[in-house]
Amino acid sequence: MSSSSSPVEDTLGGTAGRPGSRLRSPTFRRTRSLTGIPLLWALPGVALVVAFIYVAFGAGAWYAFTSWDGVSASAPWVGLDNFKEIVNDPSARDALWHTLELTAAFVILVNVIGLSFALALNRTVKSRNWLRAALFAPVIVSPIAVSYVWQYIFAFTGPLNSLFGTLGLSSWQHDWLGDPDWAIWTILVLLVWQYAGLTMSFYLAGLQGIPEELDEAAAVDGASTAFRLRRVTLPLLAPATTVSVALTTIFGLRVFDQVVGLTEGGPGGATETLATQVYKQGFVQGRFGYSAAFALILTALVAIVSLTQIAVLRRREARL
Amino acid sequence: MGLFRYTIRTFGRELALILIAAIWWVPFYFLITVSLKPADELYTNPSGLPSHVEFSNFSSAWEGVGGVTLGDALKSSAIITAGSIAALIVIGSLCAYAIARREGRISTGLYALFVFGIIIPFQLGLIPIYVTMRKVGLAGTYPGTILLYTGLLMPLAVFLYTGFVRRLPRDYEEAAYVDGASRLRTFIRVVFPLLRPVTATVAMLATVIIWNDFFIQVIFLSGSPRLTLPVAVYSFVGQYASQWNLVFAAVIITILPLLAFYVFAQRQLIKGFSGGVKS
């Protein structure tokens, strides 16, 4: 490296700490060098992360293979029993299935809607700053608290059914929260409502990085709006899409607050998810080993999503 | 430039967007109107405006539940949020500075430790943390909860700070250091003020995450007198189910501090949230 650099670069360039830099002009000679901030400064942060993330994670993973009750001194090793129980118990299987179907529907809807908002808001619309602020507002509102507003809206005697009644659509009225087939979709509505503003902001940030001239050039060449969207805008939005899809998938897999606020997992377990099972089995029932098994499944799913996201981003970077 | 003009079609798009935003705000309409309704209008008039404004809903809600007023809960939420953010900023900025300004394998490894920590979900680790904290008497306390949030959000803070410090030229700090200031003094007087934009991002993201978090707070604080707002509202609903006017007053008290903050800082907040996309 140093053999190829010219003397000019050596005088002008600033690779501090290199042996040659001592030979620079005497006025620049350093009596003290700032390189080497003591690693001790990093210690509190490192200790916290090791304790609360890595050690805790390892201990939790260990518990998943025990039948620990959280009180006894010993945690009896039970091998794969907890996972066998999850596979064999229909209600546990349902919790996994609800999580997956809710996540899939949520990720598709919230990204399609957020992207549509972003495309509609980008450029020319005069009230765009107001609209963006209004659509983003639900993101910063306490999920558990705002869930109760939606519980009111979906209640049998609530405004949604009364609106259908007024419109002469009484056949559309349902006991949304009390019907096992409908209850999970009320959670979907709430999730999409709350996070469409977030995906919108991801896509808006992505759109800002696309030079206007590019789109304009395509338009001048006679490309239709649909063609430009498909061949110019969407490919350039790929990084924003990757981040947005990965993050909303993780939100979906972890869903807890909105379930507790709307249905508490009911009716009859129809809206239980992995996270509500982690909470109920462990912190309510005291079956910490079994609870940890649910959490380990949740972690594995999140890890798959995160690692896929990293791989996709890496490959794209390599291609550029 | 001239190609994307404001046309009649743009006007149509604008009207459609305003309509959608209005629909998006329907839950807030119910939140406000119901919180101001007298109890007897909840079923006779579920969707309309209240016939008269019933502010006493708010004073009733303020009484809270089980001896914990919403004032107490507000205080708990504020202490936990502020305490965690202070710790995140102090510990996170120092840690990131040391990592970013050192070269070599150790700092690369430490950086990876933090980045990888961002993607590890916290639910699994929460089980041993809860049991340990219960054993040593930290569960249900402010210091325990603050410590927990500081640990869980440290990867995010260090990640944001490190990225920022790496783009920061060394000239200022080297000048101060050559002038004889100690390393720590250089950091406090010169570097930390330059980190202000990223400190603001860390503080904003952590505020929204911690203030609104329910999972950790319901586990660690239930049954203690230090209920935070999300847990207080949850307990409140348990007691006043279907007294929606009171419940909604409690919901407003819970979300108002962040909404007020949002009104003033919405640009920075949206930017902070979407910051990860730029890379």
Image: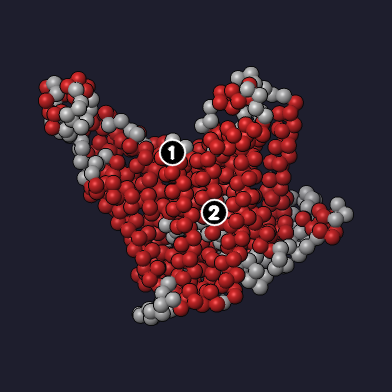
Binning the other alpha carbons within 10 Å of mark 1 as few (below 14), some (14 to 19) or many (20 upward) gives few
| Residue at 52 percent of width and 74 percent of height | A86
- Marks 1/2 in contact by CB < 8 Å: the verdict is no
Q: Is residue B186 above or below residue A282?
A: above
Q: Is the residue at mark 1 from the same chain as the one at mark 2?
A: yes
Q: Which colour scheme is used?
A: secondary structure
| Helix, strand or loop under label 1 | helix
| Residue at 24 percent of width and 47 percent of height | B105
Q: How many marks can you see?
A: 2
| Helix, strand or loop under label 2 | helix
The quadrant the N terminus of chain B occupies is: top right
Q: Is residue A248 above or below residue B160?
A: below
| Furthest residue toward right | A168
Residue type pointed to by label 1: Arg
- How far, Cα to Cα, is label 1 from label 2? 25 Å
The quadrant the C terminus of chain B occupies is: top left
In screen coordinates, is B2 left or right of A21? right
In screen coordinates, is B98 left or right of B76? left
| Residue at 65 percent of width and 69 percent of height | A270
Q: Position of residue A161 (x, y in %)?
A: 79, 58
**Which numbered tag is attached to residue B160?**
none
Residue B260 in view in this figure: no
**Which numbered tag is attached to residue A249?**
2
In screen coordinates, is B44 left or right of B266? right
Residue type pointed to by label 2: Thr
Name the subunit of mark 1.
Answer: A
Question: Closer to the camera, B250 or A231?
Answer: A231
Q: In which quarter of the image is residue A122?
A: top right
Which residue position holds label 1?
A: A319
Name the subunit of mark 2.
Answer: A
Q: Where is residue B133 in the image (x, y as percent from the top left)?
A: 38, 67
Residue A222 in view in this figure: yes
